[in-house]
Amino acid sequence: MKNIALIVGSLSTPSINRAVGEFIVAQFPENISVQNVQIGDLPLYTQNLDSQEIPAYTRIRQQLQTADAVLIVSPEHNRGIPAAVKNVIDIASRPFGQNLWQGKKVAIVTASPGAYGGINAGLQIRQSLQSIGADVLTSSEVFLSRANTALNDAYEVSDERTAGFLQKFATAFLAWIEK
């Protein structure tokens, strides 16, 4: 059984990115376990906390350490990476010598109501992760533009074209983590 950690970079409720992430993981077969990694309660990372036991940091680090792969589904904030996503990347890369991202398989999906689909955030997330040794899926990147139009009033993916696209991504992601 494979264990996937799902990080949703939006702290909003409701959330386009939570809806997209939930749709993707719903495509996974039963032998795939998905853990939702909650990032909204994390204190901002500072090196001053490296010597302290921070329960939220410990929880995140354990979830990422036991994951076979990570799926990050994120919005874009002001043409860049959301602070909550950067914070979890930093927390899991520290303290020095305890980088949990090294060699970890990570796929990135961005979704936005805008025309560019969060591409700037996606590229910045990829750059941050690759610089600390993560194995980032680049052959099947998703930058979902006008993502709000793919959802119904219950914040579920209801657009057939988008659903098909995300199903293909889910299949490619699972094939990649099996390699």
Image: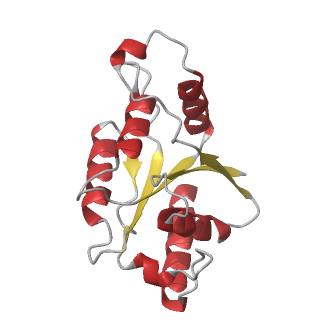
In the image, residue 109 lies at what x, y percent? 42, 63
Q: How is the image coloured?
A: secondary structure
Q: Is residue 125 visible?
A: yes
Q: Is residue 165 above or below residue 92?
A: below
In the image, residue 156 lies at what x, y percent? 60, 76
Residue lying farthest to the right in this orientation: 30
Q: Is residue 61 above or below residue 11?
A: above
Residue 32 falls left or right of residue 133? right
Q: Is residue 144 above or below residue 138?
A: below
Q: Residue at x 35, y 77 (%)?
A: 145
Q: Residue at x 54, y 82 (%)?
A: 163
Q: Nearer the viewer, residue 176 or 91?
A: 91
Q: Residue at x 50, y 61 (%)?
A: 176
Residue lying farthest to the top in this orientation: 51
In the image, residue 89 lies at what x, y percent? 40, 38
In the image, residue 119 lies at what x, y percent? 28, 65
Total numbered labels placed on residues in the image: 0
Q: Residue at x 39, y 36 (%)?
A: 87
Q: Nearer the viewer, residue 21 or 155?
A: 155
Q: Is residue 130 above or below residue 57?
A: below
Q: Is residue 102 visible?
A: no
